[in-house]
Image (tube, rainbow, N blue to C red):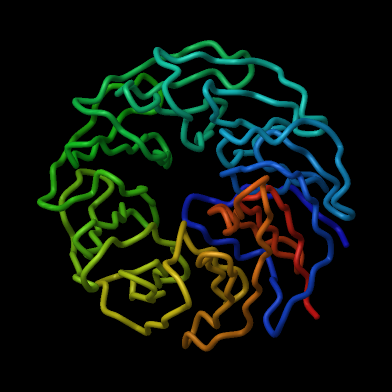
Amino acid sequence: MAIVSVRLSETGYNPEASGPKDGVEVAWRHPACTEASSGAVVHNGQVSAGGLVVNGRTGRTVGGEWDGHASTPTFDNGRVYVGAHDLLALDAATGEREWTFETESDSGGMATPAVEDGTVYTRGQFDDPTIYAVDASSGEENWRFELDGEGRFQLAVAGETVYSIDETSTVYALNATNGEKQWHQSPSADIERSVPVIGDGMLYLGAGEGDLLALDADDGSTVWRRSLGSGSVGPVAVGDRILFLPGPETDLIALAAPDGHEEWRRSVSATLSGAPVVADDFVYVIAGHTLYAFDASNGDEGWQFETREVMFVDYDRGGVNSGLTVVDDLVYVATAPGDLYALQAQ
């Protein structure tokens, strides 16, 4: 088994992967025995969750620690970048810290950073309405931009533009090189908790009232808007002219990307969390303790796998963290009680 470096694009689409389709079993499970919120990322034969690095073939510890406040890492050019109380750059091979960037606040943890062309983009914590651009090699600040309101969720970078949303449901597009504002729009939708996703020139945003918005990424104008039910809509994965997203309540929904019309819808056992991942015509999603795989063409279920709960002194903790990865016929997932799984075809 050859495990290569993988950084899933912000579309959640990995056309080079071929994940398990008919059923899975545990290839290995690494129990870190810590409460955690990060997902997993694969790089050069290793897997990182938070600051922990394990061997991708065996699950054995290579280095680093899984900080419970750490975000899902982002891999780029030999480093993993992690949002915790500060922005951390770690050696991807060993987990050793290379630099730390401190924002204006240390209140709460930081979201998953984005990396593009030698720059790390991140946003401040709960009481810091700032977007920071940091040199990926040195950790020195390149620029900062202050939003009109706080922004609590991760941003997106595509080409020369950084996209972010603040608590007033305003979308900002910034020049990635110097931080100058290119445009801003305030759609009549509750999008303050939305994770922006870019695909094929569109900016996709899920709204709290159950709508999905497709905005033109060049100017923020609304191209189409679809009502999907009552309740929040999660971040999309952009496949080949089709979108997959957690819909209201427990629905996984497939929509045509050009106009948003519904292709199919399937219900699962619990509320979906995080963006789906699309690999080799299958869609992988997280719902509570369970991971599901569906045929992307028609929504037929391929398999489901339930992760374990872990007892911490006097209470149980369980659930799969958002941020799953599909690489070389394996699915990697991290859980809230600190288990890191590699799942293989049966």
The residue that appears at 70% across and 30% down in the rendered structure is 79
| Residue 344 in picture, x, y percent from top left | 78, 71
Of the 4 image quadrants, the one containing the N terminus is bottom right
| Residue 85 in picture, x, y percent from top left | 52, 23
Of the 4 image quadrants, the one containing the C terminus is bottom right
Left or right: residue 79 versus residue 153 is right
Decide: is 287 above or below 318: below
- Give 235 or 280, whichever is nearer the viewer: 235
| Residue 144 in picture, x, y percent from top left | 36, 17
Decide: is 326 above or below 198: below
Residue farthest to the left? 188
Decide: is 219 above or below 24: above
Left or right: residue 7 versus residue 254 is right
The residue that appears at 53% across and 61% down in the rendered structure is 13
The residue that appears at 89% across and 54% down in the rendered structure is 58
The residue that appears at 77% across and 23% down in the rendered structure is 96
Give the total of numbered labels.
0
Left or right: residue 172 versus residue 43 is left
Residue farthest to the front? 314
| Residue 59 in picture, x, y percent from top left | 85, 51
